[in-house]
Image: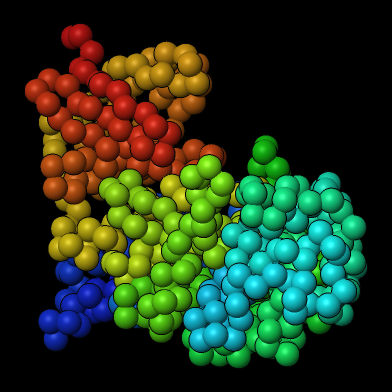
Amino acid sequence: MIEQRVGLVGFACALASLAGSCATSDPGDVAVRRARAILSAYFRSSGAPALQIAVGMDGRIVWSEAFGQADRAREIPAGTGSRFRIASVSKLMTGTLLAKLSERGALDLDKPLGEYVPDIPEAWTAITARMLVSHTSGIPHYADPQDGLDTTYYATSRAAIAHFRDRPLAHAPGQGETYSSYAYTVLALAIEAATGAPFLEVMKKEILEPLGMNSTGPDLRLNPAPERTAFYQLADDGTVSDAPDIDLSGRWAGSGYLSTAEDLARFGLAHTQGGEMPPGVRRLVAQRQPLPGGAWTREGFGWGPRSDWDGRAMIWGDGSTPGAKCGLLVYPTENLAIAILTNARGVPLERGEFQTLARLFLAAREGVRPSTVPRELAGRWDGSVKVEGATLPVSLSIRDSATGEQGQVSFEGWRSLSIVDAFQLGSTTWLVPLDRTGFFPITLTRSGDAVTAKATRADWSFELRRPPQ
């Protein structure tokens, strides 16, 4: 079952609107069709019960679609309005909220908690909001798997910290980087102290309502939101089972929200040039924080500042919790945001999948239309590649067909991947291979009787040649 709200013509019109016209032959039309074909194949392979995607460009949603079942037992199809858990993507919203409060002087990022949050452990008093949001506070993450499966309802942030307040710090405040969802619960308490209002109310007033994120809110276990999906676990062998029952009231700020891909794409677009977030907020969320010795944190204000395979700046966040695997990728300069949500933990969905799809939309923005792979590349190519210290023979087979070039890339004794799409961008051929571990591009550049293949995601670069006749 598939629901598609904004389709091919919608995206083509969105890109063509600047020229005052709408034509379905726009390169954006091709980008959506190819992205949809890739994602459809991925969805079938992944084992996820449901998947939702939204792509935003230039301040508007240009593609939104849902696949599969929101609830298998009740046979409810997923729609573009289905609400999924967004796990640690919640941290991106909290990070932006903190940056917004700081920008207007409502909260001092570097003021020690002990100066304005009463009755906290002595070890926390020197911690600042900047440390909490960038995972340098030293407050530890879950001590064991049961922490992530907590079923206790916590009425307040103050009640929630009682669960971990007596645990020792992982390191002195500001002296290292330790990923921690609990740190965000303490951050919620700091936000409440600074604003005088409950965290959920502050988030709604400052982020959700201004951005029109009407389908985003806390995952209330005892009062489920309308259109909330069921939640599942995906085992390595592809078996799907119900996710364990959990209560996220102790982790609203770090992993407790429900949303839709459309809402998250709107949220992402707010962080692009010309988006609703002030420039100072956009700068803060895209900044890593310094560590002793000259190192820098991996994340800034919940967001992960990164560069894509072509060197473009992007900001990123993903999440995994019982019943969810999801992500949000934003290109601030290119005004592009992609959100993908699933309702199962264990789904293979990482930054590489997002970048693969993004490359199609970025090409459309640049006016580059994906074209047919040159016929001379059809056939078999052989070579070898180093994988985890071993040199493996690799063979590539590209089929020349009227419906598009498909084929296989096989690594002897290890794995074989089906090529679900192949196209030419400029002088480079893009192949999109797929197996149960996800999909990623392999680019081919021809030089004489050989081709150089690169798979940036796996850090592979190898040469292929025609086998002897």
Residue 402 point in image, percent of width and height? 21, 45
* Nearer-the-camera pick, 306 or 13: 306
Q: Residue at x 41, y 64 (%)?
A: 330
Q: How is the image coloured?
A: rainbow
The part of the image, by quadrant, that contains residue 252 is: bottom right
Residue 250 point in image, percent of width and height? 81, 69
Residue 411 point in image, percent of width and height? 43, 22
* Nearer-the-camera pick, 406 or 329: 329
Residue 65 point in image, percent of width and height? 46, 70
Q: Residue furthest left?
A: 448
Q: Is residue 6 left or right of residue 444?
A: right
Q: Residue at x 14, y 86 (%)?
A: 20
Q: Residue at x 32, y 71 (%)?
A: 335
* Nearer-the-camera pick, 263 or 280: 280
Q: Residue at x 23, y 34 (%)?
A: 444
Residue 341 appearing in the image: no
- Image quadrant where one finds the C terminus: top left
Q: Is residue 272 left or right of residue 294?
A: left
The part of the image, by quadrant, that contains residue 258 is: bottom right
Q: From the viewer's perspective, is residue 193 above or below residue 347?
A: below
Tally of numbered discs? 0
- Image quadrant where one finds the N terminus: bottom right
The part of the image, by quadrant, that contains residue 301 is: bottom right
Residue 408 appearing in the image: yes
Q: Is residue 74 left or right of residue 376?
A: right
